Amino acid sequence: MQPSEAMLVFNMAMAEYDSEVPVTRKVIAAVPAGQEGYAPDPRSMNALKLAWHIVASEIWFLNSIADGEFVPEEGAGVPAEVKSAADVVAWYDTYRDGALARLKAMSGAELAEPIDFFGLLNLPGAAYLSFNLRHVVHHRGQLSAYLRPMGGKVPSIYGGSADEPMS
């Protein structure tokens, strides 16, 4: 990938990313207080772990692209101080802008450099933005399916929901 192509891919992915952040925040914030331990199946992550996975892996992805390498996270579980969906959203709001600033400071040449993803992929840095976005959307969809069984309301995502019609 040429630097100019990497910048095009980056700018397109960032436009999509910017429109997904408010939706991600809304879905996580919709987890009802007291229901953080809900999981639809014993093999499923509970709501708090899933919400944490969504934001922590997103920030890890963004920082890894900026670092030019993917290194496994140590101690990647939910931090002890994160006890609610509101805590997850607050953490996300605190760390997202710094990670994005690092990416936005990258040149086209830097974004065009291939980065190994644990021997599974070797894509230009810019291409991992859409990979990250698909990962977030996948898990956000899982979390949104937890909401009604937990007694929560499903926010609008790509259109209205029964709980939040389009205005």
Image (tube, helix red, strand yellow):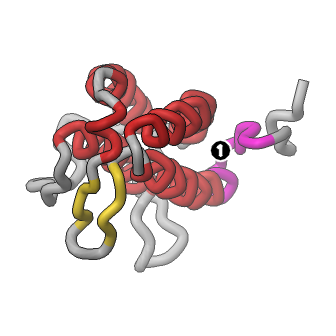
Boundaries of the magenta span: 147-158
**153 over 136 or under it: above or below:** above
Q: Is residue 129 magenta?
A: no
Query: What is the residue that sits farthest to the left in this orientation?
Result: 74
In the image, taking residue 152 as reference, residue 129 lies left or right, namely left
The quarter holding residue 90 reads: top left
Between 125 and 84, the residue placed more toward the observer is 125
Between 80 and 127, the residue placed more toward the observer is 127
Report the amino acid beneath label 1: Gly
Q: Quadrant of the C terminus?
A: top right
Between 87 and 160, the residue placed more toward the observer is 160
Q: Residue at image x 41%, y 51%? A: 1
Secondary element type, mark 1: loop
Can you give x and y, in whole percent of width and height, for residue 72 in the image? 15, 59
The quarter holding residue 65 reads: top left
Q: Is residue 152 magenta?
A: yes
Residue under circle 1?
152
Can you give x and y, in whole percent of width and height, for residue 146 in the image? 60, 58
Q: Residue at image x 72%, y 41%? A: 157
- Any part of residue 21 in sight: no
**118 over 49 or under it: above or below:** below
**4 over 72 or under it: above or below:** above
Can you give x and y, in whole percent of width and height, for residue 79 in the image? 19, 43
Between 112 and 88, the residue placed more toward the observer is 112
Q: Mark 1: give few (<14), some (14-19) or many (20+) Cα within 10 Å.
A: some
Q: Residue at image x 76%, y 38%? A: 156
Main secondary structure along the magenta-highlighted residues: loop
In the image, taking residue 61 as reference, residue 48 lies left or right, namely right
Can you give x and y, in whole percent of width and height, for residue 55 in the image? 38, 42
